[in-house]
Structures are given as structure tokens and as C-alpha cells.
Image (spheres, rainbow, N blue to C red):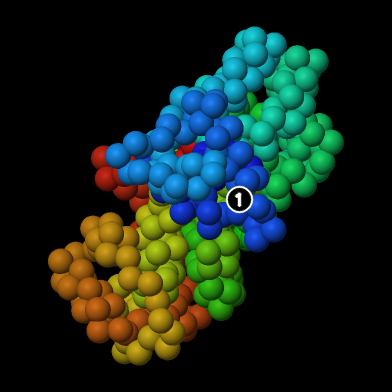
Amino acid sequence: MFMEMLSTYKRTFIPLEVFEKAVSSNMTYEQFAQEIQRLEEQGILVPVKSAGNNGRMPSLSYKYKIQRTKLHQKTHKQIEKLQIKCHRELSLDNYYSLPPSAWEEDLPYIEKINQYIMQHDWPQEEVPAPERSLALTGDEKWIQEKNGKRVLERLQIWERMKIVPVHDPLSFAIHPQVLQNKHQFHLVVENKTTYDGLLGALTDTPFSTLIYGQGYKIIKSMEHFTRQIPLPNVEHTIYYFGDLDWEGIQIWHLLMNKIQVIPAIPFYQASLQKQAMPIKTKQKINEEALQDFLQYFSEKDQQQIDTILHNHLYLAQEVLSSAQLKQIWSENTWSHPSPKSFKKTLESE
């Protein structure tokens, strides 16, 4: 009964009182002592003689050393035995460093996954997560709602399962006249008001799409970009315009960690001409995101943005009217920045 507790216990030595606190009130001392002695006999617990014993019958040490190699020995043998039967490209190595409970919990799914691979080999086409989940385990909710992704990652086969993420699709308007260009420009805006304000000017710009980010939803929905806008043999430049506050910068930063996204400087510069307002809600401060964001701006603009944010002020996208938004978008020159400025490109995703 103490195996689960020992597998998650972080220290090398464990006091007897830790076991005592873990037992149920209806367990007798004799039953408790038998459990501890059984672990001693298996070599999992080694009494620390210098700690003394409790003087009861049967006598137990006040402290034990945990022999983790013995603790996990049974599980490791099971892993080795199953590895021999598994598909040659299915690795169970990660389970040697995980608690036995993780192995026991994942084992039924590992066996089903192995059976699927042995019968069908590796998937050749991408399918949505519920479809792949049903094929692998008979449960369409396993991958997304029951830690199935974690198991596939432990087995180091998440990418090989070719699973299409099931998130809300991108919401965007398209400019068909420029879809033949070798270089495609896209603008993501954080809020719906700004999206509506810019929509009428899309065909007056070189941009292929105007994308409604919906706040943090863009972090996941952008994963659908290449599927929803399947333009082969072209380069993409994606600009972003959000609220000039900690949240807006955080959204940009999270998106930038996935793909190359450039702050749409002309919109932000126009916003800086407006009166900043006090932030109404508490926002999480992310200095790293701010510093990465500021690198795109002039020194003067950097100082102004830094002052606004650190004085608990902000500039919402709505400080720019629809007329101003359209004018900024259609009258500015938008170009492809030097590749040296960026660490990631959309094509590398």
C-alpha cells in the first residue's frame, strides 16, 4: 500500500512517522508493521540503525533509507519485457525515469498504440485529434481530454501520429487580387472593433488577409494558417496590431514564440499620439515580452511605451477611429523586413 507514496517521495530517507500519517484509522499496528517489514524484506526500505527503533512488537526503525533501484525494479522488468514485443520504432525509454504509477496508468494505452502501429504502420495523412484518438484507443476523447497527448509525447511519437489540432479556425477576410503574388502580407488585429474598422480598406492595400485575432485565441487558431491559406511557393510576412498594454504585448510575444510576427509599427506610432488611459484591470507584467517588443521601435518610441506601461496606463486599439485605421493601412509602405531581424519564419514551422 505504500509503494505509490514511495515512488513520489522526493527524499532518500523517510521517517516512520510519514508512514504513520498515511495509514487509515482502522488499520491495526500489527497490520501496519507487516506492510513496513514486507518492504524491508524486498530491500526497498533499509532501516537506519542510528535512528533507533520504536520499541514496539514487532519493532520498526524510526527512519528508513529508500532503495529506489529496488522500488522500480519490478516496473523496469515489465518495461523491458514489453519493449521486446513492441514495434522496433516505438521507444519506452522515458518510462524508466518516471514513477511506476505513470507506467501502470499508461500501459493499457501503450499496448493499444503498439497494436495499431503493428497492424497499420505509421499514419501517412493528417487527421483531427478525435479521429486519430478513436483509431488508436477506441475513445475519441482520449487525446484531447484524457492526457492522450502526454502519452504520445512520452513515447516520442506525437509528431509521427500526424494529428491536426482541433482549435477554433482562423477568422479572416481575403483580398483575392493579390493571391498570385510571390510575397504575401497578412495583418492580425487583436480586437473585433479594429477588424471591422479596417475591413473596408483591405482591397486598398497589398495585404492578402485581415485576420481577427480574438485576443489569446490567435495563439491556437494560427496553427491552422497554412491549411486555411494554402498558397504554395510563396513567402509570408505577418504583422500584428493589438492593445498597447501588458496583455496585448503578451499575446504578440506568445504568438512570436510560434511564428514570425512583426508589430505593425505605423498603427502603434499613431496610437502613441493619443492620450493614454489608466489600466482598469490588473495585468501580469512580462518584462521579457516588453523588451522583445520594444526592439522594433525607435529609441523615442521605446521610452514612451515603457513609461506608459510602467505608470499603469495603456492605449487601446480603439483610440484610432475607423477613418484613421484605414488611412494608416492604405497609405503606409509595407515591406518585407530583412531576414536577419528574425529567428523564425513561417516556412520553418
Q: Considering only vertical position in the picture, is 83 above or below 127? A: above
Residue at x-position 54% and y-position 44%: 57
- Closer to the camera in the image, 286 or 211: 286
Place of residue 258 in the rendered image (x, y in percent of width and height, measured from the top left): 45, 47
Note whether residue 62 is visible: yes
Judge left or right: residue 226 versus residue 126. Answer: left
Q: Considering only vertical position in the picture, is 272 above or below 44? A: below
Judge left or right: residue 117 versus residue 11. Answer: right
Residue that protrudes farthest toward the right in the picture = 138
Judge left or right: residue 52 versus residue 33. Answer: left
- Closer to the camera in the image, 115 or 14: 14
Judge the density around disc 1: few (<14), some (14-19), many (≥20) Cα neighbours within 10 Å: some
Place of residue 85 in the rendered image (x, y in percent of width and height, measured from the top left): 69, 11
Residue at x-position 17% and y-position 73%: 303
Place of residue 277 in the rendered image (x, y in percent of width and height, measured from the top left): 35, 89
Residue at x-position 28% and y-position 78%: 309
As shown in the figure, which amino acid type bears the numbered disc 1?
Tyr
Q: Considering only vertical position in the picture, is 297 above or below 115? A: below
Q: Considering only vertical position in the picture, is 229 above or below 187? A: above
Rendered-image quadrant of the N terminus: top right
Place of residue 329 in the rendered image (x, y in percent of width and height, measured from the top left): 44, 67
Note whether residue 338 is visible: no
**Label total for image:** 1
- Closer to the camera in the image, 33 or 70: 33
Residue at x-position 20% and y-position 69%: 302
- Mark 1 element type: helix
Residue corresponding to mark 1: 29
Judge left or right: residue 68 versus residue 112. Answer: left
- Closer to the camera in the image, 16 or 122: 16
